[in-house]
Amino acid sequence: MLRLKLTAWVVTAGALLIAAACSSSRSDDDNRANQTDGGKGGAASQGGAAGKGRGGSTSRPPPPDAAGDGGSGGEAEECPGCKSGVCLEDGTCVDCLPSKDRCPSGEYCSEDNECHPGCKDTTSCASGICAEDHSCKHCIDDSECSGGTICSAGECTPACGTRQEGTSTGCSDGTICCSERCSNLAIDSKNCGACGNACDTGQFCGLTTCANSGEGGAGGAGADSGSCVQCRDTTLANICSVKKVTVILDSNKNPSDGNRVPARAIGAALRANCLPAPVLAEAEQDSVEALNIKTGQPVSDSSELLVVAGGPFYQNLEGYLENEALMPLYAAFTGDVTEFRRTGTDKVVASLPFAGDHDSHDVFIIQFTRHPVSGSLILNEQGFWLSGTVAGAYQLTHGILPELPQQDKAWYAYEWTDADGDKEPDLNEIELLDSGK
């Protein structure tokens, strides 16, 4: 099946969503303000398929036209006699000017007019936060650090020495020197519980039941011990192996309660059902430190589970992950049909005609993944329509969490059909369509 380019898909989907807004059934991702009083699903939801993710296109959006760092592309060099093209007022050639920084990516222009490793602005950092010392806050690799420091446990710090290996000497509280890098053994998938104990691809460093021995559940002392963690598969059976659950809210894009009520219901259910009980928090996507507030890229670690209810249109984090092909499934739109597809193979796992009564019928997905660079853990559930995200939250809280050890897949696709006419989900109305890792 031919797949439209992203821009064309967004225009087409937007036009159809506007048309759909005039009908009694409205899409989970059009800008509707419908709400319910809660019921079994918690509340009406927004966040489905139509939006900025991959949206039916196998290709990534083309990069914007660029003229290079700090220049307009065709302008003449200020100092033709200088190799760098820039000079001081007296004509002395220099590598760069802080006032007109043209250093390559990953470098900044210092006061001595030389390019040094470090960030120059918010675009240089995965987190979108460049500190005054030109190191990225919540760094994800060494290239985001300045002054000869390296990225250790999300912070730019000096390297520890070989003589300090396996000890906390030279490291901040709670970290151990592993291969000259300060590591948090409770969350580091390369040093899970001990230096050199690396988790396999598709795994993360998560809590074990012994972490519950510390007072306060996941916030207790046991949870900080390297002896209370092990490498765990990235499947729904292990979504409780975290110290903290943060519900990501989309108020900056979504004026109604849409995704927020079911997301909060999921967070509360995790807090109530997980042992040890995680710390529960919520944050707006344009203010949270767990992700880049502009791009949606996650920069938290595996001690924290980010809960995202809804699809890529309103949720920046889900949009980033689907666009970068980092989620198991993605939402697509192919004219008159909405689909959920496998990332990589494009296999359709669930589909639904755009037209129809979606107040009583929808498909939805529940999926869990680990960001391969930052280690961030993300739990996402989304339907195509308002009713689907509500049904997804209901299935997660009432069907999956009570039988969590049996949920050995990374993703599940379901279909909900209202059988009793109350337009609220029941477990006997939800059918499993497909699942996988």
Image (cartoon, helix red, strand yellow):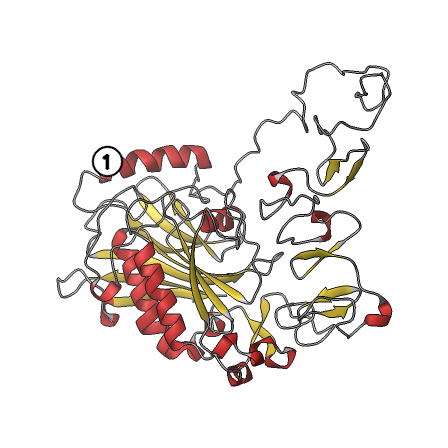
Name the residue beneath numbered marker 1: 19
- Residue 112's quadrant in the figure? top right
Compared to residue 214, the image places residue 333 above or below, namely above
**Other-residue count near label 1 (Cα within 10 Å), few / some / many at <14 / 14–19 / ≥20:** few
Q: Is residue 212 left or right of residue 395?
A: right
Q: Where is residue 325? Give x, y as percent.
A: 53, 50
Which one is in front, 241 or 2?
241
Q: Where is residue 75? Give x, y as percent.
A: 69, 15
Q: Where is residue 230? Give x, y as percent.
A: 61, 77
Which one is in front, 221 or 211?
221
Compared to residue 190, the image places residue 282 above or below, namely above
Q: Where is residue 8? Give x, y as percent.
A: 41, 32
Which one is in front, 434 or 143?
143
The type of residue carrying mark 1 is Ala
Compared to residue 344, the image places residue 186 above or below, namely below
The residue sitting at 47% across, 70% down in the picture is: 239
